[in-house]
Image: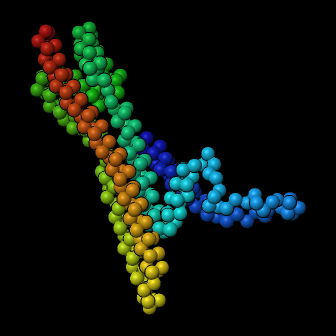
Amino acid sequence: MKKLFALIAVFGMLFMGASIFAQDEPTDSPVTEDASQVAEEPVAAVVPAAQAPVTEDGGGLAVLHTTLKTKFIEGGAGFMGTVLLTLIFGLALAFERIIYLNMAATNTDKLLSSVEEALKDGGVEAAKEVCRNTRGPVASIFYQGLDRVNEGIDVVEKSVVSYGSVQMGLLEKNLSWISLFIAIAPMLGFMGTVIGMIDAFDKIQQQGDISPTIVAGGIKIALITTVFGLVVAIILQIFYNYLVSQIDGIVNKMEDASISLVDLLVKHNLKK
């Protein structure tokens, strides 16, 4: 799974880098159109660029892509590329966590019913087999508790609590890296802003005069890096909060199911 998402991150970097820089290369291919056909074309057929109609298949996405590419290049390949890397790796980790949490989700009511039926029909071994064939942290916790049922209810409770902490750590894996990328992205943007401002003042010092063009250009380039850094942080923060809410929901189900399992084992032992 880790190798898969590492490949996704690499391919994402290559794809986004190619989409940004591919259209900037000049086309050196000669025009093969016949001169007689060019001469016959009416001048009135030429539409100004400002009035050219927008095709339906391009639309707003094409304009957005062109704008982002232009601003990305204006901001500088160094810092903008680093901010882009934080976005790609952060999204790769977020998607990995989303898939893992979706696979970890378990219908606890159905699992409890299956375990109870197995306890009635085949005993503890049958219940352990049900947990072994069910994926998710809740089934793993149930298996650890059932595996120690002969040692007493107190030992079962301790094992359930201890293994629940282990499963919660697995659910929260890689969240610290996502939070790190959330913090790094705006910092890189601010660093690019400071360096851009220093470059603008260097140009003013070289010119010996304050030129609005030089100052405006330097400040614009400086602020572009900040904007992109904040956008990346906002995107990753949304995914981070979603993951935290999903983990909280799974942990609540784990705790509730663990209490139900202990009650079920007490009830089962009393019947025995």
Between residue 128 and residue 55, name the one nearer to us: 55
- Asked if residue 151 lies left or right of residue 74, the reply is left
> Can you give x and y, in whole percent of width and height, for residue 42 in the image?
81, 60
At a point 76% along the width and 63% down the height, the residue shown is 29
| Residue nearest the observer in this picture, 11 or 64 | 64
Quarter of the image for the N terminus: give it.
top left
Q: Looking at the image, can residue 48 be seen?
A: yes
Relative to 201, is 185 above or below? above
Taking depth in this image into account, of 220 and 44 the one nearest to the observer is 44
Whether residue 174 is visible, yes or no, is no
Q: What x and y, as percent, mark residue 139?
A: 29, 26
**Residue beneath the point at 30% across and 51% down:** 176
| Residue 205 placement, left or right of 241 | right
- Name above or below for residue 125 compared with residue 249: above
Q: Outermost residue, bottom direction?
A: 208
Looking at the image, how many numbered discs can be counted on the residues? 0
